[in-house]
C-alpha cells in the first residue's frame, strides 16, 4: 500500500477531511493522463481511506469505450499506481467507474450526460456533487465550459440535498491554461462567465508534490532558515527542471508549446514563488496566492539577452542512441521550437534585490532531476584561507539543495575540518532523504490535488491573477524569440546539459550551474 503519508497522519486527516459523496467526471478520459495518473491517484486515495464511500468516476471521451474503459483503468491503476491485482479494494473501486461517449462540441451529448449523472445520484447517493476534470486538449476547454453552463450543469442543483449533504460543482482545468497572456485572459473570461472563481481549480501537478509543499514547511515551520533567506546571505538561486525523456510522441502538442510554455510558465514559476515568497499571514488559499502573485509581479521584465533557448539534436541517453527533436514524429524538420530554456531574472523587492535567479528546463538532458539550489555568500572573513591544505577541496560557499525529484530530499553543504594535523577544510553534506525518513511512496502528486478539489480547498491551485502574472512575464520572451529565429539549431546533443550559451550566461556573472 502506498504511504502517501504516515499511518497516524492518514487517520487524523481522514477524520477531518473526508469529501462529500460526489461524481468525478473526467473529460478527455481516453488520454494518457487519466490512465497513468488520475485513476492511480484516485485509487491511492481510496486505499488510504480518504475518499467518500459514495463516489463514482465517469470517463468522457469521443470513442465508444463503454466496454473497455473500466478494465483499462484497472490496468492503469495496477501499472501506474504500484498496486497488486489482488488488492481487496481494487475490484469494488473499479465497479464505480463508468464511461460516457460524446463529442465535446455537441450540445445533445451534454443533455445525455446530465441525465446519466442524475441517475448516478439516484443509484449511488452522490448528492448532485460534481467534480468536472478537463483533461482534454486545450482547444476543447472553451466548448466544454460553455456547454456545461448552457445545460445548467455548472451550478449546484440546490444548496442542500435532502439527506443533508451540501451540493457543489467544481471544475479542475489541466494545463496549458492559455498559450500566452492574451489567450489566458480570454480563457479566464470564458471560464468566469460560467463558474465562480471558487469553483475553478487550475491544476499544476507540481503543487501536489510533497517536496514542493515542503518548501513552505522548510522555510516557515523552522526557525533557523528564514533569518538567512534573503539578499544579505544568499548569493544566487538556481532552479533546474531537467528531463532525460524526449517529447514522448507528443509532437503536435510540443510544436505549439516548447519548454518555456510547457514547464517554465507553470511548474518552474510555481517553484520560484515558493522559494521567494514572503510568509503568508495564514495557510488559507487567498493568503498564499496573494504572496505568490507578489513575487511574480516583482520580477523585473526579462530581457531577451537574459534568456537562452536550445533544441536537442541526436545523441545518447543512458547509453542508448536517440533521435534529435527535428526527427521526432510529427515535428517540423526545420522546427524552431525550443526543448530547452534558461532564464536569468531578478526579483525587485526588499528581500531579493540584486540576487540573480537562474532557471533552466529542458528535455533530453543528461538526467532527470528537478532541484532548487540556494547558494549562500562566502563568509565575510576567510579565516582559513591560508589553511586550505593540498588534497582538501577548500572552503566552498554553503549550499542548500532541495531535491524535488527524484531521490527527494534536502541537503546542506558546509565546510568541515579534514581530520589530521593541518587545518584542511573540505565541503561535507548533511542530507535528509524522504525515502529514509518517511518510506517510499508511489503517490504521483495528483492525490493531494484531487482530494483538495473535492474538499473545495484551492490553496494549491493557480488563481486567475497568478496565471496572468506568469504569462505576463513569459509572453514578451516568446514574442522576442518568435521575431528572432536562431540559425544554429539543434544546439545541444541529446544526453548533455543543454546549449553552451546557458553556461556562458552564468560564466559572464562569474558563476557556474551546480553540477547535478
Ligand atoms: C508536464 C509537461 O506538465 O510536466 C511534460 O507537459 C513534462 O512535458 C511533465 O514531462 C514533467 O512532470 P514531472 O512530474 O515528470 O516532472
Image: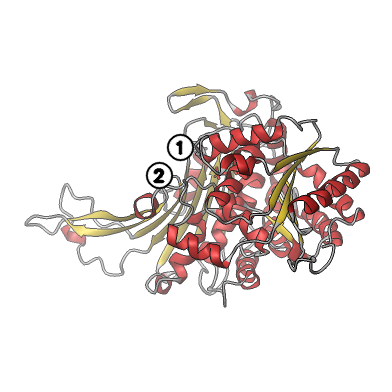
Label annotation for residue 516: 2
| Secondary structure under the numbered disc 1 in the rendered image | loop
Q: Residue furthest bottom?
A: 281
* Residue 195 in sight here: yes
Label annotation for residue 50: none
Q: Identify which residue, 1 or 401, lies in the foreground.
A: 1
Q: Position of residue 470 (x, y in %)?
A: 67, 58
Category of crowding for the residue at label 2, using alpha-carbon neighbours closer than 10 angstroms: few (below 14), some (14–19), many (at least 20): few
Which residue lies at the image location 6% right of the left edge and 57% below the top edge? 421
Which residue lies at the image location 62% right of the left edge and 44% below the top edge? 93
Q: Identify which residue, 273 or 15, lies in the foreground.
A: 15
Label 1: which residue?
367
Mark 2 near ligand 1 (CB under 8 Å)? Answer: no
Q: Quadrant of residue 455?
A: bottom right
Which residue lies at the image location 70% right of the left edge and 36% below the top edge? 31
Q: Position of residue 492 (x, y in %)?
A: 53, 32
Q: Position of residue 292 (x, y in %)?
A: 61, 66
Q: Quadrant of residue 199?
A: bottom right
The quadrant where ligand 1 appears is top right
| Secondary structure under the numbered disc 2 in the rendered image | loop
Category of crowding for the residue at label 1, using alpha-carbon neighbours closer than 10 angstroms: few (below 14), some (14–19), many (at least 20): some
Q: Are marks 2 and 1 in contact (CB under 8 Å)?
A: yes
Q: Earlier in the sequence, mark 2 or mark 1?
A: 1
The vertical placement of 378 against 23, above or below, is: below
Q: Identify which residue, 293 or 128, lies in the foreground.
A: 128
Q: Position of residue 145 (x, y in %)?
A: 84, 52
Q: Quadrant of the C terminus?
A: top left
* Residue 230 in sight here: no
Q: CA distance from mark 2 to mark 1?
A: 9 Å
Amino acid at each position: 500500500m502506498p504511504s502517501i503519508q504516515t499511518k497516524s497522519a492518514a487517520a487524523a486527516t481522514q477524520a477531518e477531511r473526508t469529501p462529500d459523496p460526489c461524481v468525478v467526471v473526467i473529460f478527455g478520459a481516453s488520454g494518457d493522463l487519466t490512465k497513468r495518473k488520475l485513476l492511480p491517484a484516485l485509487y491511492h486515495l481510496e486505499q488510504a481511506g480518504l475518499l467518500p464511500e459514495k463516489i463514482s468516476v465517469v470517463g468522457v471521451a469521443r470513442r465508444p469505450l463503454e466496454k473497455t474503459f473500466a478494465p483499462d483503468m484497472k490496468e492503469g491503476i495496477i501499472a501506474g499506481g504500484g498496486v497488486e491485482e489482488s488488492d481487496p479494494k481494487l475490484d469494488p473501486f473499479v465497479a464505480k467507474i463508468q464511461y460516457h461517449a460524446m463529442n465535446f462540441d455537441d450540445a445533445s451529448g451534454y443533455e445525455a450526460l446530465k441525465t446519466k449523472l442524475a441517475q448516478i445520484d439516484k443509484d449511488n447517493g452522490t448528492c448532485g456533487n460534481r467534480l468536472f476534470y478537463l483533461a482534454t486538449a486545450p482547444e476543447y476547454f472553451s466548448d466544454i465550459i460553455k456547454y456545461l453552463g448552457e445545460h445548467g450543469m455548472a451550478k449546484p442543483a440546490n444548496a442542500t440535498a435532502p439527506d443533508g449533504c451540501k451540493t457543489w460543482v467544481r471544475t479542475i482545468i489541466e494545463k496549458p491554461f492559455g498559450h500566452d497572456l492574451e489567450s489566458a485572459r480570454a480563457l479566464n473570461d470564458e471560464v468566469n462567465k460560467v463558474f465562480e472563481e471558487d469553483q475553478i481549480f487550475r491544476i499544476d501537478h507540481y503543487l501536489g508534490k510533497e517536496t514542493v509543499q515542503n518548501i513552505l514547511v522548510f522555510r516557515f515551520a523552522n526557525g533557523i532558515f528564514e533569518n538567512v533567506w534573503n539578499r544579505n546571505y544568499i548569493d544566487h538561486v538556481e532552479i533546474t527542471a531537467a528531463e532525460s525523456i524526449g517529447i514522448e510522441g507528443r509532437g503536435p502538442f510540443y510544436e505549439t508549446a516548447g519548454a518555456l510554455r510547457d514547464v517554465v510558465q507553470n511548474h518552474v514559476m510555481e517553484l520560484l514563488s515558493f522559494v521567494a515568497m514572503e510568509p503568508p499571514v495564514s495557510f488559507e488559499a487567498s493568503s498564499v496566492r496573494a504572496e505568490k502573485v507578489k513575487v511574480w509581479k516583482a520580477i523585473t521584465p526579462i530581457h531577451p539577452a537574459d534568456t537562452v533557448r536550445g533544441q536537442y539534436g541526436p545523441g545518447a541517453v543512458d547509453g542508448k542512441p536517440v533521435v534529435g527533436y527535428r526527427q521526432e514524429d510529427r515535428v517540423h524538420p526545420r522546427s524552431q521550437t525550443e526543448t530547452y530554456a534558461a532564464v536569468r531574472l531578478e526579483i525587485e523587492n526588499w528581500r531579493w534585490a540584486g540576487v540573480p535567479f537562474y532557471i533552466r528546463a529542458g528535455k533530453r538532458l543528461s538526467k532527470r532531476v528537478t532541484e532548487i539550489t540556494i547558494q549562500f555568500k562566502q563568509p565575510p572573513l576567510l579565516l582559513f584561507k591560508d589553511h586550505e591544505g593540498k588534497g582538501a577541496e577548500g572552503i566552498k560557499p554553503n549550499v542548500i539543495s532541495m531535491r524535488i525529484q527524484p531521490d527527494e530530499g534536502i541537503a546542506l553543504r558546509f565546510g568541515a575540518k579534514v581530520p589530521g594535523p593541518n587545518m584542511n577544510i573540505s565541503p561535507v553534506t548533511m542530507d535528509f532523504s524522504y525515502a529514509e525518513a518517511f518510506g517510499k511512496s508511489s503517490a504521483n502528486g495528483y492525490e493531494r490535488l484531487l482530494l483538495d478539489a473535492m474538499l473545495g480547498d484551492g490553496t494549491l491551485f493557480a488563481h486567475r491573477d497568478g496565471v496572468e502574472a506568469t504569462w505576463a512575464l513569459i509572453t514578451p520572451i516568446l514574442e522576442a524569440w518568435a521575431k528572432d529565429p536562431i540559425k544554429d539549431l539543434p544546439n545541444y546533443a541529446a544526453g548533455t546539459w543543454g546549449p553552451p550559451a546557458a553556461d556562458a550566461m552564468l560564466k559572464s556573472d562569474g558563476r557556474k550551474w551546480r553540477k547535478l
